[in-house]
Image (cartoon, rainbow, N blue to C red):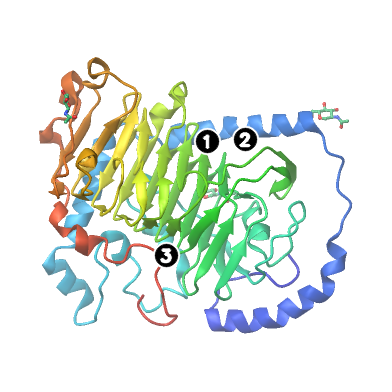
């Protein structure tokens, strides 16, 4: 990592100064990057992905928690604590701090967030709370918005950062629009941290496949479209032929410990966030979703029984204008959907099939005017005799404009009896809790 883009942590202004100097050097050295590539070997490539999937399964099993209700309760307790008047006064004195939920309280009130960016890795809550991202690694500054080289990505680009093998905390030297030319394959132990800039990632999907410990924070992700595939590098020592990518926003396959926070997502060709193939330990929080049909798919196949270990928290998000359905649509796993603001849907908000457990707590559901779309829930392709035993519960949700949540549970409900739950912060506080959903405009040296 000789030139330009990797360096130890230091105050951002010094960093940027040094960087500006080094970027010139890097540009001058560019021609030396064209090293000869090893011959491509299809068999070796298949073996490589099979091995990655196998390793990932072991990590998913380790990240899965056997008592998901305890995790739910921990989440709800944290929200109560962070929003208690007394704790506000004690911890923040007279200093103005408008962070309204425990994730934001962990970092947004601190004027030094930019010189201690890795603190963010301690702020996740819910099933993805262990997501370390690039914590412990060096800082990598994206200075080059181009995406022309897929096998030997250029230093300074986002693609060069995400394919590295070691932990990296990836930040952006300035605001930029990155138009991906093919799917962006993100390796383990990476944080993509857009704080301090307005960063747009468009054109193709971000893929997390067989990885763990990824944090995606404070970036705009939109207008991802399908691509035919081709040769793409996924890690420092491997590239290979990729088949078609669907044009999701973020596609998470066989991965664990992933946290997506304060992103703004809209208008992608397929799903905004897809979580599939035995992924688990995931939190999607503080994000703003608009202008999209299939918002989130958790479990893509009726036969992928490994998705029973999927555990996902969806919290403090704003499901806004122009959304149609799947917020989320679930199969098999355990899903806590808590303290979100649903202001727009056309068909339904939360749905699924194949016996997912869906605990909806402290959300606000504002139904559309269409009399046929008042129901929050939708069971796909299942008769009553089958779905009556799926545990779908609504607790402390606020229903507006005729919205209703059709609960089920039958004989399985006893496993999650009301007695076991710590109630979530009530849905009437959702406006406050989600007030800052989406990308933030953080100034360096000031609370955000
Ligand atoms: C391709 O990879 C396989 C598996 O690693 C190996 O057995 C084979 O010899 C390789 N073929 C070539 C032409 O390198
Ligand atoms: C990735 O992060 C996890 C959690 O901090 C850590 O245990 C693991 O060693 C890291 N991986 C690498 C390659 O550093
Ligand atoms: C709600 O679910 C019950 C079974 O749990 C079903 O009998 C009923 O038709 C559903 N109501 C609506 C309005 O979908």
Q: Quadrant of the N terminus?
A: bottom right
Q: Please tell me which residue is depicted at 37% across the width and 79% down the height of the picture.
A: 111
Relative image position of residue 151 (x, y in whole percent): 76, 51
Relative horizontal placement of residue 381, taking residue 426 as reference (left or right): right
Q: Which residue is mark 1?
A: 254
Residue furthest out toward the right: 36
Quarter of the image where one finds residue 2: bottom right
**Label 2 lies in ligand 2 vicinity (Cβ under 8 Å):** no
- Image location of residue 320, percent across then percent down: 32, 56
Side of 140 relative to 394 (left or right): right
Residue 303 seen in this snapshot = yes
Q: CA distance from mark 1 to mark 3?
A: 26 Å
Q: Mark 3: which secondary structure? A: helix
Q: Is residue 192 above or below residue 233?
A: below
| Horizontal side of residue 349 vs 130, given as left or right | left
Per the image, the residue denoted by label 2 is: 52
Task: Of the two numbered discs 3 and 2 on the same chain, state the one appearing first in sequence.
Answer: 2
Closest to the camera, between mark 1 and mark 2, is: 1
Considering the numbered disc 2 on the image, is that residue within a helix, a strand or a loop? helix
Where residue 242 sits in the image (x, y, percent)?
69, 40
Find out whether the residues at labels 1 and 2 contact each other: C-beta distance under 8 Å: yes
Q: Does 235 sit above or below residue 136? A: above
Q: Which mark sits nearer the N-terminus, 1 or 2?
A: 2
Q: Which residue is mark 3?
A: 119
């Amino acid at each position: 990592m000789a030139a330009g883009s990797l360096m130890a942590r230091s105050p951002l202004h010094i960093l940027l100064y040094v960087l500006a100097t080094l970027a010139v050097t890097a540009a001058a050295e560019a021609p030396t990057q064209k090293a000869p590539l090893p011959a491509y070997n299809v068999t070796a490539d298949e073996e490589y992905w099979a091995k990655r999937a196998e390793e990932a399964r072991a990590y998913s099993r380790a990240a899965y928690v056997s008592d998901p209700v305890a995790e739910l309760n921990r989440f709800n307790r944290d929200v109560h604590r962070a929003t208690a008047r007394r704790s506000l006064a004690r911890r923040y004195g007279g200093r103005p701090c408008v962070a309204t939920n425990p994730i934001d309280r962990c970092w947004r009130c601190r004027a030094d967030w930019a010189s201690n960016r890795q603190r963010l890795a301690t702020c996740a809550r819910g099933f993805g709370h262990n997501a370390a991202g690039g914590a412990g690694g060096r800082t990598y500054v994206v200075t080059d918005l181009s995406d022309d080289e897929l096998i030997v990505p250029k230093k300074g680009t986002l693609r060069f950062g995400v394919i590295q093998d070691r932990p990296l905390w990836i930040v952006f030297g300035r605001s930029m629009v990155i138009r991906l030319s093919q799917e962006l394959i993100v390796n383990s132990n990476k944080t993509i941290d857009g704080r301090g800039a307005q960063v747009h990632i468009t054109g193709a999907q971000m893929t997390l496949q067989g990885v763990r410990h990824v944090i995606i924070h404070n970036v705009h992700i939109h207008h991802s479209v399908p691509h035919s595939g081709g040769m793409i590098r996924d890690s420092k020592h491997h590239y290979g032929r990729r088949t078609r990518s669907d044009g999701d926003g973020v596609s998470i396959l066989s991965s664990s410990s992933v946290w997506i926070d304060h992103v703004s997502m809209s208008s992608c060709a397929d799903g905004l966030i897809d979580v599939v193939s035995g992924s688990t330990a995931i939190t999607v929080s503080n994000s703003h979703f608009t202008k999209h049909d299939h918002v989130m798919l958790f479990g893509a196949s009726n036969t992928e029984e490994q998705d029973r270990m999927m555990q996902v928290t969806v919290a403090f998000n704003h499901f806004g204008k122009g959304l149609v359905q799947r917020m989320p649509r679930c199969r098999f796993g355990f899903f806590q959907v808590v303290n979100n603001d649903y202001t727009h849907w056309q068909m339904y908000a939360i749905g699924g099939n194949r016996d997912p457990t869906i605990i909806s707590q402290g959300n606000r559901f504002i139904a559309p005017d269409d009399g046929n779309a008042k129901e929050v829930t939708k069971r796909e392709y299942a008769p009553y005799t089958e779905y009556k035993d799926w545990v779908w519960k609504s607790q402390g949700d606020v229903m507006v404009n005729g919205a209703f949540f059709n609960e089920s549970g039958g004989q399985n409900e006893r496993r999650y009896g009301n007695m076991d739950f710590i109630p979530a912060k009530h849905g009437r506080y959702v406006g406050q809790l989600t007030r800052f959903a989406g990308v933030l405009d953080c100034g360096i040296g000031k609370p955000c």
